[in-house]
Image (cartoon, coloured by chain):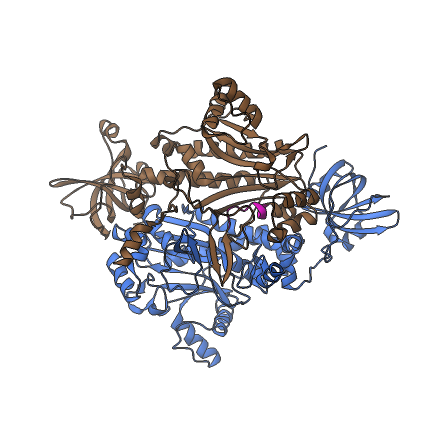
Chain colours: A brown, B blue
Amino acid sequence: MERILICETPKKIGDKVRLAGWVNAIRDHGKITFLDLRDRSGIVQCVGKDLEKVSSESVVEIIGSIAERPEKLINQNLKTGKVEVQIEELKIISKSAELPFDIGTEDLNLELPTLLDFRSLTLRHPKIKAIFKVQEVVIDSFRRALQAKDFFEFQAPSIISSAPEGGAEIFEVDYFGHKTYLAQSPQLYKSLLVSIFERVFSVNKVFRAEPSVTTRHLTEVVSLDAEFGFIEDYLEVKEMAEYTIKFVLDQVAEKCAKELEMWGATIPKVSKSIPIIKLREAQEIIYKRTGRDCRKEKDLAPEDEREICKWSLEEKGSDLVFVSHYPTKARPFYTYPDPEDPEFNQGFDLIGRGTEWMTGGRRIHDYQTLMEHVKEWGITPKNIELYLQAYKYGMPPLGGFAFGAERITMHILGLKNVREASLFPRDMERVDFRFSQTEEDSSK
Amino acid sequence: MERILICETPKKIGDKVRLAGWVNAIRDHGKITFLDLRDRSGIVQCVGKDLEKVSSESVVEIIGSIAERPEKLINQNLKTGKVEVQIEELKIISKSAELPFDIGTEDLNLELPTLLDFRSLTLRHPKIKAIFKVQEVVIDSFRRALQAKDFFEFQAPSIISSAPEGGAEIFEVDYFGHKTYLAQSPQLYKSLLVSIFERVFSVNKVFRAEPSVTTRHLTEVVSLDAEFGFIEDYLEVKEMAEYTIKFVLDQVAEKCAKELEMWGATIPKVSKSIPIIKLREAQEIIYKRTGRDCRKEKDLAPEDEREICKWSLEEKGSDLVFVSHYPTKARPFYTYPDPEDPEFNQGFDLIGRGTEWMTGGRRIHDYQTLMEHVKEWGITPKNIELYLQAYKYGMPPLGGFAFGAERITMHILGLKNVREASLFPRDMERVDFRFSQTEEDSSK
């Protein structure tokens, strides 16, 4: 008999079927045992008499017949749905050791270190798994949004030969005795590839050696990057970024209703056209609303980001708002200065629910201007030679944007810590396990 | 007027249009100039009188009207198609410097070092670009093949805390003063994730510090990995691997006809069911056919791989053949020994056109057996604790397979060197540029 998935059971009432999965929970009532079986498609309650003793999380195969559950029981336990399985045969395929904690509960109330120390176990919990279902949809819909616009997907390099932009927070790799580094961003590669494919995107790892442990930082991040050429102005970049983020949010709303509900999360409210305002305008608005004078700052502080989001929701009906025109000197060398006011540039951030969601902007495409910036920003041309080559031999006007898959997932679900949105989060203290744990152990 | 793409021009005969792209080639006949314009969709010939001087590879915008070309001219120059553009306005958007070599030719006959030193320029050549069109289809169809079978796409970690399997050929990363490494394979993560998602795949970078420069090795590779649980036997893994590779090849055949033609390449011939033979059987066949006795070797030598492919094509009508049952001790600790003959295991390689295309097999799922192997193989359990955790708490029978995107692309197109199939190949001597070049320069 071929195995069927739990999600297929409601259509098989009265049938004898074969199921396989994990023992999500077990309730032993003497002769009668209730066993919640979990597979990749869901959870179903199974009932049997005189069953062999089986531990939670063991892998089992069940042959049984499917019956409808009484209406009133369904409401008591939504999780296991409208049917139950009357067990005829139970076979233990793989026995689980005793669990360090119960994972068959509705919520998994564990501290973050425990959640991560037992990652192979805690990821099995439906609510934790839901985070990665959302993230998969985020990444997949980012990809499909851009494929629909004729973007080429490229594989960005991870090992780079030099640290072009600043570079204190960069990991060093011993490369056959040479110093190399892990890429912090595919920015220079995606830009140069515009001179080849016109429109490119990538889903790739970037690495940031931030020497601080915050709730928002990971050292290894899945970066979603896009860049395209032949633009008229920076607003065309804003439009593409807006189209992409809206597509992603729509897909999450459509495909992850259950997951959003589990986390009590709602998709941000987005107006027909997401508002875009200049930094100085945003600061003026904040000053008028709060009296707090940040009008000479070169960036928005966290409280400013929260205030501008409040304004955007109240005045424009949008949880998301673009802020553009940061001071030219405060952004990377390739950002396009506004021709009408070159002290400010045509880069932008997308702010949502009080925090940064995405960053992007128009880039310089003219080789002479770029070389002047390279000099002014103190960058060694030799270190970015491949990038400069693209501009030397003809580059169209271009722009692009990027956002982190983990952060977007965190923002959508309202997670408290970005580590929860990474399957195997790496930070200053942890690569799978905390260094203090592993080092103590190896010194024994 | 909105820009249209070159691929749209045949449908716009008689219309006035706006095009934009790069000057692929220019032929100056005094008053009249022929200019081949290239954009992401193709190349079209444009003709104009008294044009401003423009260099090859400059980015230009052309307004002009589309005319049919005389039949006899089409045959002379297939590349630029059935129409030409009569230039009314030519605007130079971005001027190219003088090129180090001509890239407007049908073939780009450059030595590999030049091809790579000028990567931002050489990638613009249609035949080079074609390699990455094929690779994009390979990766995208791998993804879609497995999504159709309900596989979850995960993001594999790149930084790992220890080097579990051997480990001489592994890159070390200075991680806030701790020793960490770059992952050589997502094997342990994809296996452990089977206990969570049942079916998983990933498209991710792996890193191999092979201290040799061959035509087949890169240090940074795009690995296509799949793993799934609840299998009956290793042949189910072979079936899934076969389905996937066939799907990929079919998609390349369908979507890359032009690219295959450019390279004079054909899709390998595949029989309805790809043959699978045991290593010892393969060696017996080779002995009978050639008299060469490799019947006690633990692997196939390159000449054996070529011979077994010849046999497969002659006797089974298939360019591809699976070879299984290598000696257990010659494979990693997690490979599943054949219960009927535990000296040999249920791992397999897919050999095609005389070389390895893919590797896979069934894995041990039983925790006790796995721990025995861990011990026998001399692995420190602490180093793979997260992986072992998954097995300790219930793992179904599982297996999987993996192949490199660059190698498959090389095999399909018949490229001579795998570096040609990587946008920015990294090897022992080169990260974008040869170390000897960059070090000479920095010592100046």
Is residue B388 at all visible to an observer of this figure? no
Q: Does residue B339 lie above or below A233 as drawn?
A: below
- Percent position of residue A183, x then y: 51, 49
Q: Quadrant of the C terminus of chain B?
A: bottom right
Magenta extent: A183-190
In percent of the image, x 41 and y 36: which residue is there? Answer: A410
Q: From what the image shows, is residue B149 above or below residue A231? A: below
Q: Nearer the viewer, residue B335 or B113?
A: B113
Image position, residue B174 (x, y; %) = 43, 55
Q: Quadrant of the N terminus of chain B?
A: top right
**B53 vs B131, nearest the viewer:** B53
- In the displayed orientation, state which residue is furthest to the bottom: B291
Q: Residue at x 25, y 31 (%)?
A: A77
Residue A69 lies, in percent from the top left, at: 24, 32
Work out whether A219 lies above or below A159: above
A112 or B362: which is nearer to us?
A112
Please say whether residue A112 is one of the residues in the magenta stretch. Answer: no
Horizontal relation, residue B127 to residue A266: left or right: right
